[in-house]
């Protein structure tokens, strides 16, 4: 049995990131591979070294500190991280914690191949070479599954050069958005770059429902899951709830979200998060994964665009790609949408199978 190490975001306290990590490991294990996540938890020294070496803005570090302060002020402070770590212990196989590149290299030594993906691990904004598997041994296969750059244009020529050199050694490359494909093929015209679905599409609806813990409520509800802060979101959500004669339920992320609707007293688990989406009359979200899971589960979804079109920092390409792939009307999912999702799922699974089998893994 081939051993495969996976590297992706695990500790940014985000349900979508956690569940896409679970999904990729799940399908690799179902396909007969011994897949383990490399538990990368960069310490302060590692973050500082990366900040200086990668040319990232110091404002990112300050922004991260500010977000942590907001989380500590919320009623669920500390509980969400604990809920996600408990999920890893229950549901996933992780290596020992890796605070830096040196420990990543040691933990990765026993693997036949390394896979990075998905999520915005290749973002040029917070570029981190570790997510390009720079610690791999020369004889280890490097595979990128549906990595997201999260942008429609590169922020600087320096970042262009860096990403080109980081991607060049990969044996197989795929990205999550067509915008990312255009960027990489411009930088590396001789490199094949495929566009593939986020890992959450790979297990299929039945697997997610088997994982889900459904909420204990008989009343219809509209579920709000907003990553950004915008009063218009809540106005639209309230209008949707009134139209459907439903309660407004909230899985809070921002400080603002605690002021609207009913929300849990503590952080929900990933299983509960899937269950809350699955049981909703409608999901209102500005989250890529909130919209993706709504489609997978066949739940009507009202999608808010978090960024202004034309904004250089916009990450709307993720939502645009999702809407193109899923097709139809998110507010009125139908059988045709389910068929498109199944084709999307098979495309991702077939790519993984072809790459791994072709590499003798």
Image (tube, grey):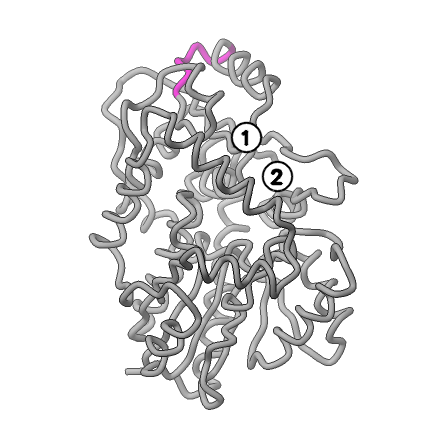
**Percent position (x, y) of residue 48?**
52, 58
**Percent position (x, y) of residue 322?**
60, 46
> Does any portion of residue 72 appear in the rendered image?
yes
What residue sits right under mark 1 in the picture? 332
| Number of callouts | 2
Q: Which residues are magenta?
A: 243-249
Q: Residues within 10 Å of mark 1 (few under 14, many from 20)?
A: some
Query: Is 175 left, or right, of 133 in this rendering?
Result: right
Q: Which of the 4 image quarters holds residue 84? A: top left
State if disc 1 and disc 2 touch (CB < 8 Å): yes
Magenta segment includes 168: no
Residue at 26% x, 63% y: name it. 93
What residue sits right under mark 2 in the picture? 328
When the figure is inspected, residue 182 is found, relative to residue 314, above or below; the finding is: below
Give the farthest residue toward the left: 90
**Percent position (x, y) of residue 77?**
33, 31
When the figure is inspected, residue 260 is found, relative to residue 304, above or below; the finding is: above
Query: Is 189 left, or right, of 233 in this rendering?
Result: right
**Percent position (x, y) of residue 240?**
52, 16
When the figure is inspected, residue 101 is found, relative to residue 40, above or below; the finding is: below
Q: Quadrant of the N terminus?
A: bottom left
Q: Secondary structure at mark 2?
A: loop
Residue at 36% x, 67% y: name it. 38
């Amino acid at each position: 049995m081939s051993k495969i190490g996976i590297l992706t975001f695990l500790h940014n306290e985000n349900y979508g990131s956690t569940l896409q990590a679970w999904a990729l490991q799940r399908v690799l294990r179902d396909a007969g591979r011994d897949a383990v996540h490399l538990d990368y938890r960069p310490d302060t020294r590692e973050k500082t070294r990366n900040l200086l070496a990668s040319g990232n803005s110091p404002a990112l570090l300050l922004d991260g500190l500010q977000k942590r302060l907001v989380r500590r002020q919320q009623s669920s402070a500390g509980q969400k991280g604990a809920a996600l770590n408990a999920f890893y212990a229950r549901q996933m196989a992780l290596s020992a914690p890796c605070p830096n590149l040196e420990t990543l290299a040691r933990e990765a030594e026993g693997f036949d191949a390394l896979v990075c993906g998905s999520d915005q691990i290749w973002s040029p904004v917070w570029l981190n070479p570790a997510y390009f598997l720079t610690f791999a041994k020369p004889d280890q296969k490097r595979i990128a599954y549906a990595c997201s750059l999260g942008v429609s244009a590169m922020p600087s020529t320096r970042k262009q050069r860096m990403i080109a050199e980081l991607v060049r050694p990969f044996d197989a490359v795929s990205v999550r958005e067509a915008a990312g494909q255009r960027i990489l093929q411009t930088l590396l015209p001789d490199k094949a770059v495929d566009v593939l679905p986020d890992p959450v599409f790979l297990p299929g609806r039945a697997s997610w429902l088997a994982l889900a813990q459904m909420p204990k409520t008989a009343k219809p509800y509209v579920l709000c899951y907003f990553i950004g802060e915008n009063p218009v979101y809540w106005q639209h959500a309230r209008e949707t709830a009134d139209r459907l004669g439903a309660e407004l339920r909230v899985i809070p992320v921002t400080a603002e979200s605690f002021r609207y609707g009913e929300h849990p007293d503590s952080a929900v688990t990933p299983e509960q998060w899937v269950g809350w989406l699955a049981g909703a009359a409608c999901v209102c979200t500005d989250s890529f994964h909130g919209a993706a899971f709504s489609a997978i589960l066949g739940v009507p979804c009202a999608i808010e665009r978090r960024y202004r079109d034309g904004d250089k920092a916009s990450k709307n390409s993720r939502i645009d790609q999702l809407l193109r792939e899923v097709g139809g009307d998110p507010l009125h999912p139908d059988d045709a949408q389910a068929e498109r999702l199944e084709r999307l799922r098979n495309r991702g699974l077939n790519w993984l199978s072809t790459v791994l089998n072709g590499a003798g893994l």
